[in-house]
Amino acid sequence: MRVKVSRKAHFNAAHRIFNKNWDDKRNEDTFGKCNGINYHGHNYELIVSVTGEIDPETGYVIDIGLLKNIIRDHVEIELDHKNLNLDVLYFKNVIPSAENISIYIYNKIKPLLNNNFDLEIILYETPRNFVTYNGN
Ligand code: NI
């Protein structure tokens, strides 16, 4: 029996959505206020889910304290109160959309987990707008 275990986390970060290969007009037409030159912030809500078999000796799929620490050490410390475009090397060449941030978070956490686990990242950029990435 495989069970999905989830941990919620949070970070605040700033970004600007633009394609550096495009001119100003095309960026403005495509991204509107998300392209604002002075950046803007979001209160990101993150749900990290791990699916796997229950260990009969602990009753756990994963120690959620371990998952909490992984998220803190490898996601929150790096991204919280940062400007994603300027402070996170990965986003020098990747547009820091919610889609791409979710992939970045997935790729940071996945190698830290047992291979038998499936990982899913849900990232809320606003209370109404969110993306899901599970490696597929
Ligand atoms: Ni934004």
Image (tube, rainbow, N blue to C red):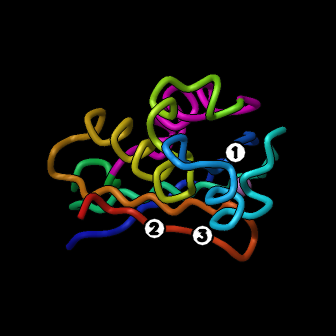
The answer to whether 84 appears left or right of 66 in the picture is: right
Question: Is the CB of the residue bearing disc 1 within 8 angstroms of ligand 1?
Answer: yes
The answer to whether 71 appears left or right of 58 in the picture is: right
Element at badge 2? strand
Residue linked to disc 3: 130
The amino acid type, in three-letter code, at marker 1 is: Arg
Whether 22 is among the magenta residues is no
Task: From this view, report whether residue 108 is shown above or below residue 89.
Answer: below
| Circles 2 and 1: CB atoms closer than 8 Å | no
The answer to which of marks 2 and 1 sits earlier in the sequence is: 1
Question: Which residue is depicted at the point 56% across and 26% down?
Answer: 88
| Circles 3 and 1: CB atoms closer than 8 Å | no
Give residue 30's position: percent from left, percent from top.
63, 66
* Label 3 Cα neighbours within 10 Å, binned few <14 / some 14-19 / many ≥20: some
In magenta, the rendered stretch is 62-82
The amino acid type, in three-letter code, at marker 3 is: Phe
| Circles 2 and 3: CB atoms closer than 8 Å | yes
Could you give the CA–CA distance between mark 2 and mark 1, rounded to whole angstroms? Answer: 21 Å
**Position of the C terminus by quadrant:** bottom left
The answer to which of marks 3 and 1 sits earlier in the sequence is: 1
The circle drawn on residue 132 is 2
Mark nearest the camera among 3 and 1 is 1
Question: Which residue is depicted at the point 75% across and 40% down?
Answer: 14
Could you give the CA–CA distance between mark 2 and mark 3, rounded to whole angstroms? Answer: 7 Å
Give residue 97's position: percent from left, percent from top.
56, 54
The answer to whether 46 appears left or right of 5 in the picture is: right
Q: Nearer the viewer, residue 29 or 31?
A: 29
Q: Nearer the viewer, residue 33 or 12?
A: 33
The circle drawn on residue 16 is 1
> Main SS type for the magenta part?
helix
